[in-house]
Image: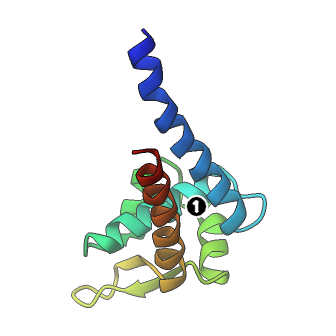
Amino acid sequence: MEVRQRGLVPAIGKIADLITWTQDNLPGGVPSIVSQAAYIVAIQTIEGCPISLKGLIGSIGCSEAGLRKPLQRLVDEGWVEIVRDQGDQRVRRAIATGKLLGALEEFADRIAERETQKA
């Protein structure tokens, strides 16, 4: 059990860092749906497959109405942009902006630095 507990410490530290980063960087009083949307959009953008709004709704497991205001907050504050799909103009895709990707890179660098210092 002791070995397993030692393994949990870095994971818990990363979770705490993520929560702190979310509170410090994403729109104030962030409900979890906002942070979930931001992380999903960022991952899909980085992978080169910007997620459709329909796909984002399905990934989070909420209704379109439930995602509308949280997503609009991310758009209004410059974290995400919504664009029409080039192949099908009916489809709208959410793309992480440089602001979101840059902030996540800084966060990843802090985690990597902490891991390097522990090694």
- Residue beneath the point at 51% across and 71% down: 106
- Residue extending farthest to the left is 87
Q: Residue 49 appears in which quarter of the rendering?
A: bottom left
Q: How many marks?
A: 1
Q: Is residue 56 above or below residue 84?
A: above
Element type at mark 1? helix
Locate residue 19, reporting x and y percent. 63, 50
- Residue beneath the point at 52% across and 62% down: 110
- Residue extending farthest to the top is 1
Q: Nearer the viewer, residue 88 or 16?
A: 16
Q: Is residue 77 above or below residue 31?
A: below
Locate residue 41, reporting x and y percent. 43, 67
- Image quadrant containing the C terminus: top left
- Residue beneath the point at 69% across and 53% down: 31
- Residue beneath the point at 78% across and 58% down: 29
- Decide if residue 97 is on the left or right side of residue 89: right
Q: Nearer the viewer, residue 105 or 33?
A: 105
Callout 1 amino acid: Leu
Q: For mark 1, what is the residue?
A: 67
Locate residue 91, reporting x and y percent. 34, 79
Locate residue 8, reporting x and y percent. 47, 28
Q: Nearer the viewer, residue 43 or 13?
A: 13
